[in-house]
Image (tube, rainbow, N blue to C red):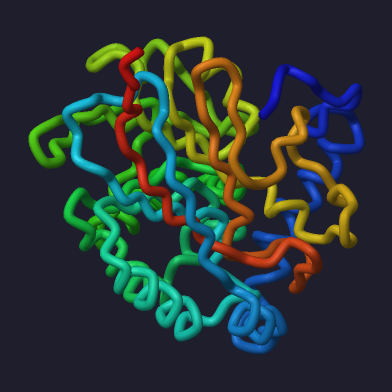
Amino acid sequence: MTGREHRWLDPNKGVFKVFERQIDRLVSRFVYPHLLGLWHPYNWLLHRRFSLAEISLSPEGWPRDIARLKVLLLSDIHTGIFLKPEILSGIVASLMELQPDLVAVAGDAVTGRASDLDGYLPALAPLSRAPLGGWYCHGNHDYFGGDPAELRKRLSSIGITTLRNESVVLAHGDGRFVLGGIDDRILGKPDWDRLASKHGPPHLLLAHHPDFFYEAEGRGVPLTLSGHTHGGQIRFRNGPPLVRQSRFCLDEGAYAHNSSLLVVSRGLGSVGLPWRYGADPEAVMIRIGPRTHKRA
């Protein structure tokens, strides 16, 4: 449960954060590509510690005539230096054996530029084979190379559709629901009015940054799916993340505020360091059903 509690320091602003972001961008674009094929220390950890979290939710405002929906949430894959395609392929194949109805990828498919996807597209392609498709929203790393349109094109080539301040209506069973995706909070141009212009507020929103949660709640979105934080990536037992990416401490897991729900995945990949500690990589299987109201 969460209110609007927040840290005094906004982790997305300030001179230090801007400097850190520029260093991250330069290293991701111009240093890591030269190490591809030479340095894969993260794969040992990913192979042993990747896990699937599961949660069942009944959001307020969810359409009552929709059959129970299985959504596979992936985020922060960060293709590139720390990840081998064959490791990713095995993980994706095992997840798709669970037969999700819909796959949601909440941003940061790459580390520094769209070409990071080269060699990884066959591994990601099965995500689009879910009955309701594979869907994507932009994260901050997707803008590091200045080529988000090329990233969208590459994902589209394997059947994964990017929602950038857009929404679609999807039919499931005897009912329909609205799926939306909003542009990245830090480097993108989020536009709530455009997002809701055709179909109204989405029932299910892809938003890379979890700090969108309170705006989504204020606009009547029942459920938001996010990533970005990596769960801190490094955190000691029973302690907070060493580096926090959410001003509202929305680090990982499920949250509720008034009538809206949020699920934040720790994500699959790694940036900065080829390691995680206390915040192991994960995907999340979310089972969504309508809220049942008991008679008095």
In-front residue for pair 229/97: 97
Residue furthest left in the image: 174
Q: Where is residue 95 shown, x and y percent of the image?
A: 38, 70
Residue positioned 25% across, 53% down in the render:
101
Asked if 32 appears above or below 11 in the picture, the reply is: below
Q: Where is residue 168 shown, x and y percent of the image?
A: 23, 30
Q: Where is residue 69 shown, x and y percent of the image?
A: 28, 45
Residue positioned 31% across, 37% down in the render:
289
Quadrant holding the N terminus: top right
In-front residue for pair 203/276: 203
Q: Where is residue 51 shown, x and y percent of the image?
A: 56, 70
Residue positioned 52% across, 29% down in the render:
261
State how many labels appear.
0
Quadrant of the rendered image containing residue 11: top right
Asked if 94 appears above or below 102 in the picture, the reply is: below
Quadrant holding the C terminus: top left
In the drawing, does residue 53 fall left or right of residue 36?
left
Residue positioned 82% across, 61% down in the render:
234
In the drawing, does residue 3 fall left or right of residue 285?
right
Asked if 29 appears above or below 165 in the picture, the reply is: below
In the drawing, does residue 81 fall left or right of residue 194?
right
In-front residue for pair 42/283: 283
In the drawing, does residue 224 fall left or right of residue 180?
right
